[in-house]
């Protein structure tokens, strides 16, 4: 067996009703809290009121930034950091989905470092240091796994380049995963974020750097979501499905924290960067089919195993046949959760397509995919989903 590392420094408070422990989760790590959140409308308003009530009782000082939105930008991070600095905050709390948690993590860096958060992206010479403020996260979707990962994904407000800050300092000190907070998530967001859970587990499992520990988490996450994601989409009030998806999300988040994603994330990130109306999960749904067709010969046994987890009726198929069927199995999952998104409807011109190709090739995730693609293969896949077929 190969040697490997595994790290999970985050204290998990997992279970229905655990939001009641918000003050305890914060008090060990600071006194003046910057609360980062998204829009407090609809069902979120109740959560907002609950958090305010819990924080008021705690005696903690509070400053609020509620401008985080999907595909968050450097401008949002700077606005949050500005409020945090003005109030001399010593702790950052993120309450929301992946975008909120990404802004919270990046603000914890920007508030305590010389430069803007993008200057600490994974490819920059300078990296976040121990001055990064402690972070506590409450996740309200299942999800991006961000509550257990050391990554923050941010889009540059000017260049539209979407990239990651990756650092051990971005691990939350504590994460509250309360499935009751997820009961009101609408079906489309449940589907898109739930598909992201699948991709984190799958891409860690087929990753050239896969580890036995992450494999364990990935198999269980895929097994759970194949049953409970369609249930959570069709009935958002299904408490059992919400809890199992919250656990699958957490497991898949541990996978990306210790192994990481591969080619689909390299191709999906620039789509959402340049077309912010496309959510992360929708972008992934666009790129998955051609990538699966290209990639299964590179990891036949692993693709076969995932196909069987998604569709136990295929248990008797020989490995190569099962592996080849991965595309069909994933397309069936996407159909069951109603996550159909059209890349062609974005109407990218030739220049825009080429920018996506170049950015996808630049991500290190591309080089740990089981079949490392050439630039031409990536271009062909973008053309295929654009309705043009291979060149
Ligand atoms: Fe993702």
Image (cartoon, rainbow, N blue to C red):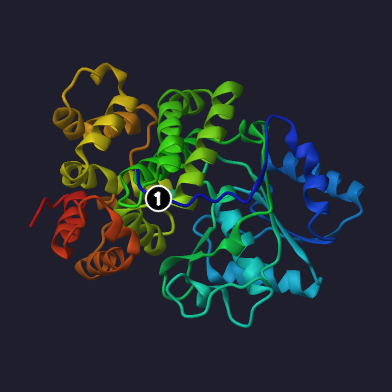
Along the line of sight, the residue nearer the viewer: 225 or 13: 13
Along the line of sight, the residue nearer the viewer: 157 or 11: 11
When the figure is inspected, residue 303 is found, relative to residue 79, above or below; the finding is: above
Along the line of sight, the residue nearer the viewer: 362 or 319: 319
Question: In the image, 105: left or right of 201?
Answer: right
Question: In the image, 175: left or right of 155?
Answer: right
Question: In the image, 15: left or right of 53?
Answer: left
Asked if residue 342 can be seen in this view, the reply is: no
The residue at which mark 1 appears reads as 3
Where is residue 31, by image quadrant? bottom right
The residue shown at (19%, 41%) is 296
Image spot of residue 202 (x, y percent):
36, 41
- Quadrant where the C terminus sits is bottom left
- Quadrant where the N terminus sits is top left
The residue shown at (51%, 45%) is 254
The residue shown at (32%, 49%) is 207
The crowding category of the residue bearing disc 1, from other C-alpha atoms within 10 Å (few below 14, some 14 to 19, many at least 20), is: few
When the figure is inspected, residue 318 is found, relative to residue 195, above or below; the finding is: above
Image spot of residue 26 (x, y percent):
79, 52
- The residue sitting at the left extreme is 391
When the figure is inspected, residue 242 is found, relative to residue 384, above or below; the finding is: above
Give the number of callouts: 1
Image spot of residue 325 (x, y percent):
19, 31
Image spot of residue 133 (x, y percent):
70, 66
Q: Could you say whether the residue bearing mark 1 is in a helix, strand or loop? A: loop
Q: Is mark 1 within 8 Å of ligand 1?
A: no
Where is residue 37, by image quadrant? bottom right
Asked if residue 45 can be seen in this view, the reply is: yes
């Amino acid at each position: 067996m190969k040697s490997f590392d595994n790290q999970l420094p985050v204290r998990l408070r997992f279970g229905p009703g655990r939001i009641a422990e918000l003050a305890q989760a914060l008090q060990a790590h600071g006194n003046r809290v910057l609360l980062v959140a998204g829009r407090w409308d609809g069902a979120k308003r109740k959560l907002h009121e609950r958090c305010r009530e819990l924080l008021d009782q705690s005696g903690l000082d509070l400053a609020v930034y509620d401008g985080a939105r999907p595909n968050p930008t450097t401008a949002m991070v700077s606005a949050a950091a500005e409020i945090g600095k003005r109030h001399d905050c010593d702790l950052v709390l993120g309450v929301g989905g992946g975008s909120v948690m990404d802004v919270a993590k990046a603000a914890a860096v920007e508030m305590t470092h010389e430069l803007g958060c993008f200057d600490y992206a994974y490819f920059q010479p300078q990296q976040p240091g121990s001055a990064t403020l402690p972070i506590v996260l409450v996740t309200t979707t299942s999800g991006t796994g961000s509550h257990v990962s050391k990554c923050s994904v941010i889009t540059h407000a000017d260049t539209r380049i979407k990239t990651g800050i990756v650092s051990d300092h971005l691990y939350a000190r504590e994460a509250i995963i309360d499935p009751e907070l997820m009961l009101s998530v609408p079906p489309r967001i449940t589907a898109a974020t739930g598909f992201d859970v699948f991709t984190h587990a799958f891409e860690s499992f087929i990753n050239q750097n896969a580890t036995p520990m992450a494999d364990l988490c990935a198999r269980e996450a895929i097994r759970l979501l194949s049953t409970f994601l369609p249930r959570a989409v069709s009935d958002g009030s299904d408490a059992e499905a919400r809890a199992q998806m919250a656990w699958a999300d957490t497991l898949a988040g541990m996978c990306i924290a210790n192994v990481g994603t591969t080619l689909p994330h390299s191709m999906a990130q620039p789509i959402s960067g340049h077309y912010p109306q496309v959510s992360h999960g929708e972008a992934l749904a666009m790129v998955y089919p051609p990538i699966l067709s290209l990639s299964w010969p590179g990891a036949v046994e692993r693709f076969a195993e995932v196909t069987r987890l998604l569709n136990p009726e295929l248990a008797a198929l020989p490995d190569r046949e099962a592996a080849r069927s991965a595309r069909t199995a994933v397309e069936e999952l996407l159909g069951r959760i109603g996550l159909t998104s059209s890349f062609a409807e974005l109407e990218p011109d030739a220049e825009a397509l080429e920018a996506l190709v170049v950015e996808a090739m630049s991500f290190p995730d591309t080089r740990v995919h089981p079949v490392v693609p050439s630039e031409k293969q990536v271009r062909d896949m973008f053309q295929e989903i654009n309705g043009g077929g291979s060149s």
